[in-house]
Amino acid sequence: MRSLATLLFLGGLIFLLTVLTGNLPFGNPPMLVGDAIQKGAADEVGAANFVTAVVLAYRGLDTLGELSILFAAATAGGLVLGAAHGGSHQRPAGFILRAGADLLFPLLLVVGLYIVMHGHLTPGGGFQGGVVLAAAFFLPLLARPGETLSHPWLSLVEGLAGTAFIVVGLIALFQGHGFLAPMFDKGTLGELVSSGSLPVLYLAVGLKVGSELASLLSRLASDDEVAS
Amino acid sequence: MIWMALTVVTLTLGAALAVMLLDNLLAAVAAASVVSLGVSVMFVMLRAPDVAMTEAAVGAGLSSLILALALRRLGLIKLDLSEKGKDGDA
């Protein structure tokens, strides 16, 4: 009976979505802001990746809100999970995981930093690169369960990165522009050092996201005397 | 292109069904990761590489890792290392 009701509900939902999407023209976005941004972003912001121009220049305040939500979530997770202990009773990982972690750690570090630093040129940016960086720092913990990350250092990096983001915004504010408005020389479109303060902001975002997620993951992974 | 899209959609829907139907929780987490991977391929097809990168890094990588770690912490998956552990124990 219950599964029948679930099936009925699912069928209704599929019907609704089919009707709704059937009436939409495919590939014709109803938004009109996109055209204006695509025309003006290269000159106004100087970022080759327009998504970054939107995320950090046109909607920088929203990104700050996103960062604070992530910060609140990571803080709450840390509170619930408690301080990290070194799980010394855990057994060491196998040879393949240890060798793979040693091999992948520098690779992931380079890829993560590349994604963060090239956020204004190619797809990607602070959030994606930060997640890759967190994974890079979590992998050795998986291979050697006795070790822990240094949480004071992680908190320091996280706090400094968050402060740097806000300070860059405040500098723009005191220079007479809006909060988090793009500053400095735009440079030539498509070069690594271009588009003013956007790479700095994305570096701050990447470090903050990476340290937050790495600390969350290491807290989650350690201290599991409940299991095993 | 349409066949590729159909293949990815079928794979994603199949993985989503597997998440609900599988009894093994770790396998369900892996299937959820496959769902995210399929969705990220679809984002690439729709020319949204930024969203695809986020989906692949967060959805396929991080969230499945967090789910698996949470399962281990809750004791819902057993790591039966203690029985057959003769190698690597130093």
Image: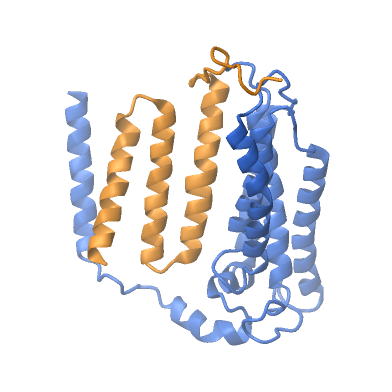
Q: Of residues A154 and A78, which is closer to you in this image? A: A154
Locate the C terminus of chain A and report the quarter of the image it occupies: top right
Residue A20: tell me if it is visible. yes
Which image quadrant is residue A28 in?
A: bottom left
Query: Residue B36, image x and y in percent?
Result: 42, 48
Q: Of residues B31 and A178, which is closer to you in this image? A: B31
Residue sitting at the far top:
B83
Query: Residue B57, image x and y in percent?
Result: 53, 51
Residue at image position (63%, 21%) is A224
Task: Give the colour of chain A.
Answer: blue
Task: Give the colour of chain B.
Answer: orange
Q: Image height check: is B30 above or below A21?
A: above
Q: Image height check: is A38 above or below B55?
A: below
Query: Residue A190, image x and y in percent?
Result: 62, 81
Residue at image position (61%, 42%) is A100
Q: Image height check: is A63 above or below A185?
A: above
Q: Image height check: is A148 above or below A61?
A: above
Is A150 left, or right, of A9 in this rendering?
right
Residue at image position (76%, 80%) is A184
Which image quadrant is residue B28 in?
A: top left
Residue at image position (48%, 60%) is B51
